[in-house]
Amino acid sequence: MTPLFFESIPVTLPRPAIYRRLGYRKEATRISTGQREEVEGYIADALPLLQLKGSALRLPIELEKPLLISLPGGNTFASRKLARFLKDAREIVLMGATAGTAIMEAIQADIGGRNVTRGVVLDATASEVVDAGLDWIMGYFRQSLRREGKTLLNSRFSAGYGDFALENQQLMHRLLQMDRLNVTITESCLLVPEKSVTAVTGIV
Amino acid sequence: MNKGMIKTLLKKRILILDGATGTELQKRGMPAGVCPERWCTENPEIIQAVQRDYREAGSDMVYTCTFGGNRLKLSEYGIIDVKEINCKLAVLSRQAVGPGVLVAGDIGPTGRFVEPFGDLPFEEAVTVFKEQVAGLVAGGVDLFVIETMMDIQEARAALLAIKETGDYFTIVTMTYEPDGRTLNGTDPVTALITLQSLGADAVGCNCSAGPEAMMEWIRAMKPYATVPLAAKPNAGIPRLVGKTTTFDMDARAFGAFSKPFAAAGVNLLGGCCGTTPDHIGALKRALEATPPTPPRRKSLAAVSSARGHVILDRDKPLFVIGERINPTGKKALQQELREGKTSLVRQMAREQEDQGADLLDVNVGVPGIDEPLAMKSLLSALAGTTGLPLVIDSPKVDTIEAALRLYPGRALLNSISGEREKMDKLLPLAARYGAMFILLPLLDGEIPETAAGRGKVVRDVYRAARRHGFTKEDIIVDGLVMTVAANPDAPGETLKTVSWCSRSFGCRTVLGVSNVSFGMPERKWLNAAFLTMAQASGLTVAIVNPANLELMAMKKAADVFLGKDRGAAIYIESFRDGEKTEKKPAGGAPLTPSEQVHQAILAGNRDDIVALIAGLLKSDAGLSAARIVEEFMIPAILRVGELYEQKTYFLPQLIASAEAMKKGLDHLEPLLRAAKFQGTSKGVILLATVQGDIHDIGKNIVALMLRNYGYDVIDLGKDVATETVIEHMKKCKPDVVGLSALMTTTMIAMKDVMELARREGLKTPFILGGAVVTDAYATSLGAAYARDGVEAVRLVEKLLKIS
């Protein structure tokens, strides 16, 4: 049960998603050239600060209706919605990604008053990039599974969605050995550094 | 069949590879989820039947069923003896197809990413592949194929494993996503440059795409290929039908791509997932009379990283090597290297890339550090930061060796001089890893004074380099720049050296330009003039600081005059923004000073707001600070709020305006205080992110907005204990308390705060906010809910009955 580690996930900027997260609406929002250049400059500033890493683990599961998902080693997830999501799967992929500490340090310094505008752009960029990191991990598994005639479900599920309690993040953090990525978890199940995420999807 | 015979064969015809093995085995009874390698040893007649069918269909080569035959994959099925199973499967293949068909030892990915992209150490990856190679050699394979690689570093590890085992013909094929890059970001030409220089005998692509897309990748690679090209497309685009991946392209349609593939320059063609002996038969029939197109060049002046490449075409504009990642004279960088940190290096890499560098020089020469380790650390950091190829700059052989082995591309080595000892060590190293190198025409530590003397050293080093397989395409001669302050003739000799290399000897040249002006005042002008003279003499590459605007501008201008920037396209693109800034503002009446202040807040102009306010205060209008705030600034920030709510503005605009407002207010604060301006505080708001929660960006934005609207904000920060909030409520007597939480696990602390406040008899209204907080949740606790900063201001105004 050793996870795969991805030490350097290529960062491809999901620009539309970053702008959407910042509240940009194509049909309504109007930005001057200077404002766009400023935002783009801040997005560019984020790039050297992002150290996108991840880990992933492929595991067999057994579904015990209506809500129990049994993992090897006596571990379980209890969630009706997750069980429904995984109904066709006999295996899952757990995945985690982090944008690293440098970006969070910059965000905190900026939001703390250094340059709040830049801070919110860095924040949105890091959030979307770390999410794109999970997309990348899913792409990796899709490609690897092709030879087995299998693929992944189209979407993924994270702790905190619906009835899949955030507390499950403790187990995911442990199984994914995210401490090796320098990601810790607080008692209230928050990942540190903040721009870190976990998710689960099914293999079909 | 040995390597030479295979090469001869490839000169005569396009070789037909086999088709899919996995999908054929599944069709013939291999159950899902088993180890294919073990299953084939237990069912030898079935794998042999598949391979015989491919031979009958016309395959010149079959792959052993050892795609997952490495230790890491086999151990998942409890198989320990890697050599034995690979040997057995190679023997089975040979028995199946006989002597007339080539048997390729098939090597697939380990399933783990290799350093610097993953946690599998590079040397361990090489060892893992060597174990498999040993088994396949024992089984009598004719050649090797490394296939379906999505990580260029893993492909390099496998290729080195084969090269370090013996002299075997080796094909390497990568697998690309529909966007034409591997999952790890490598494009086909970049992979080609890296792999052919490292010793692959054929390079190409397989799996993941149908023939149409793959043909484009072959076409893109052909002009730069020094080796034959291979393609093994899938039978069309995979499609999920129910729970099964299917491929729709039949043999006839697949075969129709044969001739276009040949025209694109393919030299080895077969099929991957979904293809069958019928598909291979269709290829064979279509290509029977089609001659191969051999590689168009014997060598290529090009360097690569994992995610990009630079072809050093002498007809192109001058190439720039960014020189900044060098600790000489840079204390901060020295400190960072000593501490094993890389953030400054990554920043320098990004900046130089943005400023127009084509390659990045990397030097870790700090006294007392473990240079090979520091170099490896930097290469790893830069592999994830920049797509620019790197120049390995070190005088130390062990540092160079560590770098060349780990670097996931084709590096440029800086440098190899005419000193015999260095040549003997560095030429074989550069050759082993396929690096280009900068030839330094030094001899025994002495720089020949004249161009003729330098030319002699160049010829001597090149003669030695040829014995290691180098051509003039693989070297870049350093013309050796000496300062004009010490010797007025020195720059002339350098230019003559560049000119001789470029026009007589026929190789590329490089100069570290800034040395020329050492010890002189206003060095930038000397550097710029010297650079353009060198360009005119035929210089190919300059080592400079790309942040030097004068130098970069002069380079671009000289590129235009030398006909290397066709249509001045790069020059025009570079300076288009400059033109824009020169343009006069559009017509219309100029704004008054007060309108400019209003406008600055609307536009989020933090740079000019203070100066504009200062100007307004000094203007003839005689406005007080209080009137400026009330009549121009507050209406502007209110308008910003409206624009944000209408979504005409998005968050960065809202925040920029808020910051402009804050700067303006901070500037006016002493005047407002002196005038006892009553409008500056509308109330006291206490803010906190609740206990257990560390996400407080939204709360900070709310604080900024409230302050701009004239509220005194007491911000307790994040992860604030319930008791601390209550204590401050008692002490500060706020008009409103705002609490934020991002997660479901922490939002419950909001309830704790509110309940304790009520128990303590505190009646202050609460506003709640945060990603998971809803209106319903807030209402259930007896609080109000604010979606964002603007709404928080509105709510506070409503609660305090201000608006």
Image: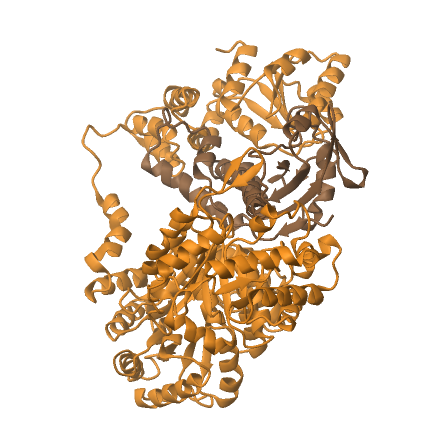
Tell which of B729 and A85 is nearer to you.
A85
Q: Quadrant of residue A104?
A: top right
Residue B800 visible to an observer of this rendering: no
Residue A65 vs B526, above or below: the answer is above
Q: Is residue B421 left or right of residue B723?
A: left
The residue lying furthest to the top in this view is: B801
Chain A drawing hue: brown
Q: State the image coordinates of residue B271 (x, y, percent, origin top left).
A: 47, 54
Q: Is residue B217 left or right of residue B275?
A: left
Tell which of B208 and B251 is nearer to you.
B251
Looking at the rendered structure, the number of numbered marks drawn on it comes to: 0
Q: Is residue B208 left or right of residue B130?
A: left
Q: Residue at x 41, y 23 (%)?
A: B647
Tell which of B407 and B19 is nearer to you.
B19
Q: Residue at x 31, y 61 (%)?
A: B552
> What colouring does the structure picture have?
by chain
Tell which of B724 and B450 is nearer to you.
B450
Q: Residue at x 46, y 31 (%)?
A: A20
Q: State the image coordinates of residue B792 (x, y, percent, origin top left).
A: 54, 19
Q: Is residue B156 left or right of residue B312?
A: right
Q: Quadrant of residue A77?
A: top right
Residue A175 vs B50, above or below: the answer is above
Q: State the image coordinates of residue B673 (x, y, percent, origin top left).
A: 49, 26
Q: State the image coordinates of residue A52 (x, y, percent, origin top left).
A: 57, 48
Residue B20 visible to an observer of this rendering: yes
Chain B drawing hue: orange
Q: Quadrant of residue B627?
A: top left
